């Protein structure tokens, strides 16, 4: 009997080691996810830098082309008016164009194609300037002859070639921009695939560990019945083992839900105020030490009082608020995930009825805020009722939520059918959105402007996801302080994901 019990205990130890191995795999997967996120962030940073570089080069090419046109305009002005003042304008435009070309050369040293284009442009520009200088030295009769036959002006050939070379440079930069944007997209796709693989691995580890824990718990309960005659020390050992397994079970269950979003900010708060707790507990611990021991320093009563009455409650309060934020974000992810798995069913919808129903549900808030809501005639579409209601409800509620203080609220809903598409616009005169945030507001957990309204930043992300699932898009037109217009573009007749894919 005794050897059987000891064998069972040894089996429990092996199971525990296996569970710890699974936990280590889970931690390694989390670290791999973090590494993938950092790698993707670095790659995206590099890609964004190159995209910005390309855009800057494009702008400089446009500036050079504009200066070249100004040079030709000044030259023709001199020919038409015989006014020497145009020579000064020509020289100014030439100096500015050469400066732009110098900057372009520095910024494209790594591009052999652009370097060749710049050499061509420099030679063409030199030929053009030489021809223009020679033209200045000709007599009045020669210039009059040029005015009478602009179509055969030999100097214009140079400016045309300069335009062609500048267009070639612009085409090269557009190709580079497309390649770098494609690289950004590929980086994001790779990160998503790695993250999905890590999620599957963690779920597999969690499932296997939970099954092992449940089986081990059943074995431990059976062991307690069989070993009831053992002494109290052995009973405490079994209880301790059960507690450890339960703690491991709770830890694994948490791992299965954490990987969906970056929770770094609340975790930083938790770690910071844990240090505050540690500092406060050290003060309390020193107050309990024996002052007769060598090297012991007893803190003052004021220090101990502050640690107990101020530092500990403050740190605990901040830790509590951070964990509550993490819980809200995770719950929001789960809600969004459930909505994303819902099967959509198209049906005929009168958008006038849909919008009126939403307006009735927020009528009390309209009256409380003194907001005027107007609804223009809307088209009829075939789409998923719940998804369309969620899209329009979210946009109308946002318009009501973000009113401009001190300005009577106005919300206008309008729509039209254009070439098989339904365009629905929700316009307000509220706070408006900075143009720099027009894309950001559609990202998950991202918000714009002053954060004085409740919310987790998933509403517009959910709206865009629903619009995509319905075969449509959503965009915003807005300026700070000038209100906003959200424009939803949906197919008039959506037949389902397979038919519209």
Image: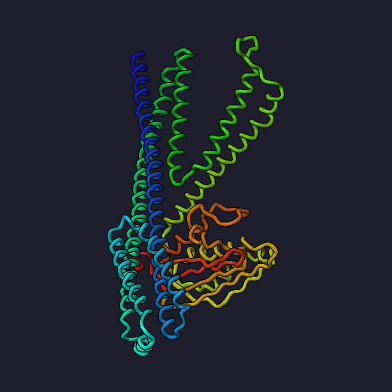
Q: Quadrant of residue 180?
A: bottom left
Applied colour scheme? rainbow
Which of 483/232 is in front?
A: 483
Q: Position of residue 96 (x, y in %)?
A: 43, 67
In the picture, the quarter occupied by the N terminus is top left
Residue positioned most to the bottom: 148
Q: Residue at x 58, y 34 (%)?
A: 273
Q: Position of residue 478 (x, y in %)?
A: 55, 66
Q: Is residue 163 visible?
A: no
Whether 128 is drawn above or below 32: the answer is below
Q: Quadrant of residue 32?
A: top left
Q: Position of residue 13 (x, y in %)?
A: 37, 22
Whether 58 is drawn above or below 255: the answer is below
Residue 487 located left or right of residue 67: right
Which of 12/369 is in front?
A: 369
Number of numbered discs on residues: 0
Q: Is residue 283 visible?
A: yes
Q: Position of residue 168 (x, y in %)?
A: 31, 68
Whether 115 is drawn above or below 152: the answer is above
In the picture, the quarter occupied by the C terminus is bottom left
Which of 370/134 is in front?
A: 134
Q: Residue at x 43, y 78 (%)?
A: 74
Whether 118 is drawn above or below 317: the answer is below
């Amino acid at each position: 009997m005794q050897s059987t019990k000891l064998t069972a205990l040894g089996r429990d130890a092996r199971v525990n080691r296996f569970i710890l191995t699974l936990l280590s795999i889970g931690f390694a997967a989390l670290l791999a996810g973090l590494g993938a996120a950092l790698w993707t962030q670095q790659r995206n940073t590099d890609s964004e830098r190159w995209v910005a570089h390309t855009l800057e080069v494009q702008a400089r090419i446009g500036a050079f082309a504009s200066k070249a046109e100004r040079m030709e305009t000044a030259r023709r002005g001199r020919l038409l008016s015989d006014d020497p003042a145009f020579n000064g304008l020509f020289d100014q435009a030439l100096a500015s164009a050469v400066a732009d070309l110098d900057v372009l050369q520095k910024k494209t040293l790594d591009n052999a194609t652009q370097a060749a284009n710049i050499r061509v442009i420099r030679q063409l520009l030199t030929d053009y300037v030489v021809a223009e200088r020679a033209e200045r030295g000709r007599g009045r009769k020669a210039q009059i002859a040029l005015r009478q036959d602009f179509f055969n002006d030999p100097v214009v050939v140079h400016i045309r070639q300069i335009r062609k070379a500048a267009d070639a440079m612009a085409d090269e930069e557009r190709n580079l921009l497309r390649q770098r944007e494609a690289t950004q997209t590929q980086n994001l796709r790779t990160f998503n695939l790695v993250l999905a693989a890590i999620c599957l691995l963690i779920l597999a580890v969690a499932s296997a560990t939970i099954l092992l824990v449940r089986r081990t718990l059943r074995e431990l309960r059976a062991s307690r019945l069989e070993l009831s005659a053992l002494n109290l020390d052995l009973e405490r050992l079994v209880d301790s083992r059960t507690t450890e397994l339960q703690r491991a079970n709770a830890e694994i269950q948490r791992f299965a839900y954490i990987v969906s979003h970056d929770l770094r900010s609340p975790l930083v708060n938790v770690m910071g105020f844990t240090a505050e707790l540690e500092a406060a507990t050290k003060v309390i611990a020193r107050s309990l030490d024996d002052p007769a021991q060598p090297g012991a320093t007893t803190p003052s009563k004021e220090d101990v009082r502050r640690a107990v009455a101020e530092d500990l409650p403050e740190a605990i309060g901040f830790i509590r608020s951070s964990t509550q934020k993490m819980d809200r974000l995770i719950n929001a992810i789960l809600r969004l995930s459930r909505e994303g798995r819902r099967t959509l069913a198209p049906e005929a919808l009168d958008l006038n009825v849909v919008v009126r129903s939403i307006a009735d549900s927020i009528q009390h808030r309209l009256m409380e805020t003194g907001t005027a809501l107007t609804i223009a005639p809307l088209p009829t579409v075939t789409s998923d009722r719940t998804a369309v209601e969620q899209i329009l409800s979210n946009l109308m509620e946002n318009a009501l939520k973000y009113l401009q203080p001190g300005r009577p609220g106005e919300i206008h809903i309008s729509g039209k059918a254009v070439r098989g598409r339904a365009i629905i616009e929700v316009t307000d005169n509220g706070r408006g959105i900075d143009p720099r945030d027009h894309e950001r507001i559609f990202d998950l957990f991202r918000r714009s402007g002053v954060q004085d309204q409740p919310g987790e930043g998933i509403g517009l992300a959910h709206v865009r996801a629903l619009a995509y699932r319905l075969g449509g898009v959503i965009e915003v037109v807005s300026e700070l302080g000038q209100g906003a217009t959200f424009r939803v573009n949906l197919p008039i007749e959506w037949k389902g994901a397979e038919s519209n894919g």
